[in-house]
Image (spheres, rainbow, N blue to C red):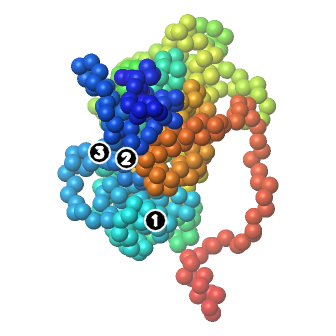
Amino acid sequence: MRCWHARASCGLLAPCGTDINKYGLPCSDCVGHIKPNAINARRPHVGKHNRSNVWEQFHQRMQEQHGLPFGELLAAEKVKAVLNKLDVQFRECVFTPITTLWVFLWQVLSPDHSCRDAVGRLLAWRLAQGKSPCSTETTSYCQARQRLPIALLQTLVRDTSRELEQSAPPGWLWKNRHVKAGDGTTVTMPDTPVNQAAFPQSRNQAPGVGFPLARLMIIVSLATGLALELAIGPTRGKKTGENTMFRGIQDVLEPGDIFLGDRYFCSYRDIARLRERNVDVVLRQHQTRHTDFRCGRWLATGDHIVVWTRPQFNAARFTREEWEALPPTMAVREIRYRVVENGFRTREIVVVTTLLDPSAYPAEDLAGLYRQRWNCELDLRSLKTSLQMNHLRCKSPEMVEKEIWAHVLAYNLMRQTMAAAAEVAAVPPRQLSFKGTVQMVNHFTSYLAVCPLQRAQLWHELLRAIATHRVGDRLNRVEPRKLKHRLAKYTYMTRPRNEERQKLCA
């Protein structure tokens, strides 16, 4: 499919010979030729099909977007298709599901994060579009968020990540294979009785003093940073560990993928199940398993292939049927490499992998791949710090889960924008700044809403601005885990707030 742009002299569409990319954008040479009246001009007929319809459809799509965030990436038609699939019925009002979704995304991206700020931005947008003003009260918006089905957010998260991951250029992949990393984290939320019942706080905290705690298990793409799948659960109780949550979302790993994880996922059961689905692993050796490089088939110094045997049956870990389904033996490769950089806590690491061919997968390459697992930690930091998801704000478990999925959807749309900018700049997405992307999107959103005729050019300039924000050289950097800024010292609360108030009033 070729790019068509408007000639400055006559306003007709003529081919420039450049392929339109998968994001539907014209080439960089054509963006400056965009004219509002170009779509109304007479167009030539080329071949069997009128190729000028490509630009006409693109320009029409840009004109018809609501002007709310991510109109170019999360089109209204895509959201409507998911709503129809879920059979969601709604009446025409200010807070339709599409508007509620976009305002929700606006809220999680805003530094303020309050409902009043989100409704205020919607009011400004409606006035800029010449529509009637909406109320500044947040009641209708909060009720609309409660009606918003969580399946809509989950489906959009999975669809946006799957589309971009499948179309990632080979240069972004590791040895032309998709690598997906997994890790867990925790988030806190308001201390309400219903939140405490669903997500109990830590046992080390007294009642009325701590905060409810939720555990998240996430799988991200190493190439693009997209969140591919997510599991949410409490941090206390049976089957609430990262391993159990990981087993519930393993289906996102497709045959031919490589799963990259820390030592917590290095278990015979998980590796065997992934190998049955033709998924390879690169994991750190679990601390309870002894590694003896004098055994097995020697490949090189600190590199050998050994045979693991099935663990003994334990009714507390799995059922008899699950244990019998495991293979009696399994061949794995163990690699030991030393960390010589100063400032690193670990001096020696043993990596376990099912990539047994030393010629196709040298030990140095596998050690470098495991080192890239730290990108998953950086992605979680982007979610919890840059998008402020470390402490949630909703007061019911249902809304807490929606808030988490809304954050992940906004995160994926930011990653999708970074991928578009990376393709424009011909660099890997990992070289672009996530924080810089969020800042640029927040700055451009208002102008994309009130300048419909210049949306294509503004969008292209947004991608160019994002491409200029590169991350620093993170390799081998060493920083002390200490704070320089002296924060104000307050006494910690050791009793519930109402008891502290009564003490002050006594």
Task: Give the residue at mark 3.
Answer: 77
**What is the distance, in whole Å, between disc 3 and disc 2 at their CAs?**
14 Å
Q: Which residue is mark 1?
A: 124
Q: Amino acid at mark 3?
A: Glu
The reply to whether residue 279 is visible in this rendering is no
In the image shown, does 325 or 94 lie closer to the viewer?
A: 94
Which numbered disc, 1 or 2, marks the residue that appears first in the sequence? 2
Q: From the top left corner, tell me how far across and down residue 262 is, in percent.
A: 55, 33
Kind of element beneath mark 1: helix
Q: Judge from the rendering whether residue 85 lies leftward or rightward of residue 312; answer left or right.
A: left
Q: Residue furthest front?
A: 9
Q: CA distance from mark 1 to mark 2?
A: 19 Å
Q: Is label 2 in a helix, a strand or a loop?
A: helix
Q: Which residue is located at x 36 percent, y 33 percent?
A: 55
Residue 211 visible in the picture = yes
Among the two numbered marks 1 and 3 on one chain, the one whose residue lies closer to the N terminus: 3
Query: Is there CB contact under 8 Å for labels 3 and 2?
Result: no
Against 389, residue 487 (above or below) is: below
Mark identifier at residue 63: 2
Image height check: is 41 above or below 191? Answer: above
- Disc 1 packing (10 Å; few <14; some 14–19; many ≥20): some
- Measuring 27% from the left and 48% from the top, which residue is drawn there? 80
